[in-house]
Image (tube, rainbow, N blue to C red):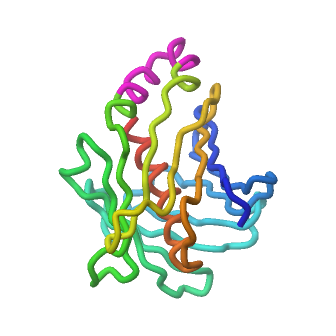
């Protein structure tokens, strides 16, 4: 994959839609989230027409603050999952990334500066102010291995008007299997944090 990668979605859309592209603008993944589902189920496609299923993300329970979102490929093989750290995520977003739901997390996602996200979320609720905050406030998140404090990947909100846009920067080499877990986790986290504001 050619880094940096970019996640983008329209702010005004009935059903949340998200795309992941590489630095050359090539589409890697496309998500159209179904609305009004009690138990989250997200399909990740390789194309905009949604004909080539790549991955599925399924919640382990009906809507819950600390639900775990499990990943599988198109053939149904389990690839791990991501889980919000419940109460610890109230002020500062924290997520654990699992290779296997019965094991300890092997990576985590942590917000770098929670005050920026809070300000961005609050001000984005005001339509006229939203036009300006989307361009000036940029929450960022670091993905790190639990075995080391060295960050692997950074997700940063990019300046954009009437659109959510995030840049994914690779900070060090990552195992290809972990890379897919990280990308699916960041996409799921972006959908969840977007709902939080």
Lateral position of residue 133 relative to residue 197, left or right: right
Q: Residue visible at 67% across and 53% down?
A: 4
Picture layout, residue 108 above or below residue 79: above
> Residue 99, percent across and down?
40, 80
Lateral position of residue 97 relative to residue 168, left or right: left
Picture layout, residue 66 above or below residue 106: above
Q: Nearer the viewer, residue 94 or 170?
A: 170
> Residue 105, percent across and down?
31, 74
Q: Residue visible at 39% across and 34% down?
A: 117
Q: Nearer the viewer, residue 60 or 81?
A: 81
Picture layout, residue 127 above or below residue 169: above
Of helix, strand and loop, which mostly describes the magenta segment? Answer: helix
Q: Residue visible at 50% across and 52% down?
A: 154
The stretch in magenta equals 119-132
Q: Residue placed farthest to the top in the image?
A: 128
Quadrant where the C terminus is found in the figure: top left
> Residue 66, percent across and down?
26, 59
Is residue 148 on the magenta stretch?
no
Q: Residue visible at 50% across and 33% down?
A: 138
> Residue 68, percent across and down?
33, 67
Quadrant where the N terminus is found in the figure: bottom right
């Amino acid at each position: 994959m050619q880094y940096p990668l970019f996640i983008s979605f329209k702010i005004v859309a009935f059903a949340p839609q998200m795309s992941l592209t590489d630095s050359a603008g090539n589409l890697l993944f496309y998500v159209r989230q179904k609305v009004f589902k009690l138990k989250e189920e997200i399909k990740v496609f390789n194309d905009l027409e949604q004909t080539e299923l790549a991955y599925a993300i399924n919640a382990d329970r009906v809507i819950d603050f600390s639900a775990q979102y499990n990943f599988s490929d198109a053939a149904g093989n389990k690839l791990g999952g991501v889980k919000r750290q419940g109460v610890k995520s109230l002020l500062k977003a924290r997520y654990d990334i699992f290779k296997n739901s019965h094991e300890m997390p092997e990576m985590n996602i942590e917000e770098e500066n929670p005050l920026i996200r809070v300000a961005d979320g609050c001000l984005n609720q005001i339509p006229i102010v939203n036009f300006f905050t989307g361009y000036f406030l940029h929450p960022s998140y670091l993905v790190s291995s639990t075995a080391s404090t060295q960050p692997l990947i950074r997700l940063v909100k990019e300046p954009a008007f009437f659109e959510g846009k995030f840049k994914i920067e690779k900070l060090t080499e990552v195992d290809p299997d972990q890379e897919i877990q990280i990308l699916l986790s960041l996409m799921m986290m972006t959908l969840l944090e977007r709902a939080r504001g």
